[in-house]
Amino acid sequence: QVQLQESGPGLVKPSETLSLTCTVSGGSITSYYWSWIRQPPAKGLEWIGCIHYSVGTNYNPSLKSRVAMSVDTSKNQFSLKLTSVTAADTAVYYCATISAAGTNWGQGTLVTVSS
Amino acid sequence: QAVVTQEPSLTVSPGGTVTLTCGSSTGAVTTGHYPYWFQQKPGQAPRTLIYDTSNKYSWTPARFSGSLLGGKAALTLSGAQPEDEAEYYCLLLYSGAVVFGGGTKLTVL
């Protein structure tokens, strides 16, 4: 069973870059598509995008201009960068695998955008 | 990007049956969208109930079932319990992209 754990700063200043890392255990980072999902307070779930180590990335069009994802196969990790953040980017951020065969999610990490 | 639609809210009586649906702006939902259903209670992370239209996890109560119904994905709850009161989200896969529905708030009353 693949397990995922998000890590990164819980507070980011407006206009700066949000950076999160997801560490994968119990499976290889080369085996799946890896997604980032977020949920603002009292709102619904939003898919940010996904990455495969050899195929590349696919981003939500609404965030595409500000998002970058990468994979570090040596550390079995993948990462999210979201630039020029505003208060609207305040949310719980989840890393996950989502495929036809099932899904695994991290526990989520709250990132607050505030000065 | 496609838009995935769900009923904003539904109410079911204890012991009753209710069906939540998940539609796609691109047309009929098919097994090729690999529909997912998640349950989320206040203050908790989403929990996956159904994947690939109708497959359950070991923790999925037997009273929940997934299907395709009238061009939509459907989640049927038969014999509702008070603990089933929650927000329910569907998810559809589109050629490498993932889209969530807006969620259905289910009240058991």
Image (tube, rainbow, N blue to C red):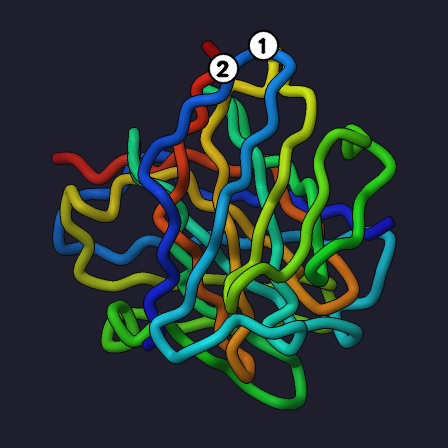
Circle 2 sits on which residue?
B108
Q: Residue at x 44, y 56 (%)?
A: B100
Q: Are marks 1 and 2 in contact (CB under 8 Å)?
A: yes
The percent position of residue A18, horizontal first and vertical second, equals 32, 53
Q: Residue at x 54, y 84 (%)?
A: B95
Q: Hey, what amino acid is under mark 1?
A: Pro
Between residues B17 and A43, which one lies in front from this camera angle? B17
Between residues B109 and A114, which one lies in front from this camera angle? B109
Tell me, yes or no, whether dots 1 and 2 are on the same chain. Answer: yes
Q: Quadrant of the N terminus of chain B?
A: bottom left
Q: Earlier in the sequence, mark 1 or mark 2?
A: 1
Q: Is residue B38 left or right of residue B67?
A: left
Circle 1 sits on which residue?
B82
Q: Is residue A112 left or right of residue A96?
A: left
Q: Residue at x 81, y 42 (%)?
A: B57
In 3D space, how far apart are the residues under numbered discs 1 and 2 (Cα atoms)?
6 Å
